[in-house]
Image: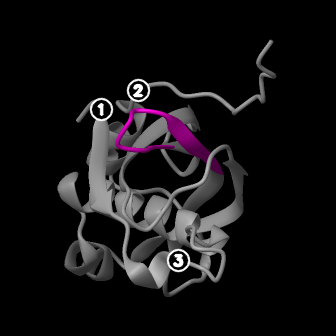
Amino acid sequence: MKKFEKTIEVRWADVDQNRHVRHSAYYDYGAHVRIKFITEAGYGSAQLSQLKIGPVLFKEECSFIKEIRPDDTIRVNVLKEGISEDGSRWKLHHEIFNQNDEKVAHITIKGAWIDMEKRKLTVPPKELARAFQELPDGEDYVYKKKS
């Protein structure tokens, strides 16, 4: 798996009283696409349950660049910044683009894999680690003021 991206239609439930997408929905979009990536890599909910492992987040941060509105359709990708050699720890990015191909948000997450029985960090199967390592490179978002 190389580039991974999903298109999402903004739902009315994602909108706040200011008639734009609420901040927590951005994180939901990232989580949705991240779990789809893991599933399409061959490790859906049933497989992870059988392996007794799951992804755990240590840090999640979003840079809100531009409003997303109720009628928008967005694209959300998954990029890597750093994956440990054994795949046990990772830093990923999600870029969110609107239907005009404008970047509207950038999410950075740091996470790992947890053994659901021992409640300790663990190493994922090699194929799952490889799927993470094969993601395209991303980088932290840096605000650039327009001149």
Q: Is residue 117 above or below residue 75?
A: below
The span picked out in magenta is 96-108
The quarter of the image holding the C terminus is top right
Q: Nearer the viewer, mark 1 or mark 3?
A: 3
* Circle 2 Cα neighbour tier, 10 Å, few/some/many (<14 / 14–19 / ≥20): some
Task: Report, in whole angstroms, how far the alpha carbon at label 1 lies from the one at label 3.
Answer: 29 Å
The residue drawn where x is 42% and y is 44% is: 98
Label 1: state its secondary structure: loop
Q: How many marks?
A: 3
Residue 27 image offset from top left, x and y in percent? 57, 65
Residue 8: x and y in percent read 30, 60
In the image, what residue type sits under mark 2? Pro
Determine which quarter of the picture holds residue 81: top right
* Coloring applied to the structure: one colour
- Disc 1 + disc 2, Cβ < 8 Å: yes
**Towards the viewer: 136 or 29:** 29
Query: In front of the other: label 3 or label 2?
Result: 3
Rendering coords of residue 65 (x, y %): 67, 43
Residue plotted at (22% across, 51% down): 41
Q: Which residue has dot 3 on it?
A: 15
Compared to residue 32, the image places residue 80 above or below, namely: above
Mark 1: few, some, or many residues within 10 Å (few <14, many ≥20)?
few
Q: Which residue is mark 1?
A: 3
Can see residue 85?
no
Find residue 75 and report its horizontal and vertical position in percent.
35, 46
**Secondary structure beneath disc 3?**
loop
**Looking at numbered disc 1 in the image, what kind of residue is underneath it?**
Lys
The reply to whether the magenta stretch includes residue 31 is no
Callout 3 amino acid: Val
Residue at 39% over, 43% down = 77
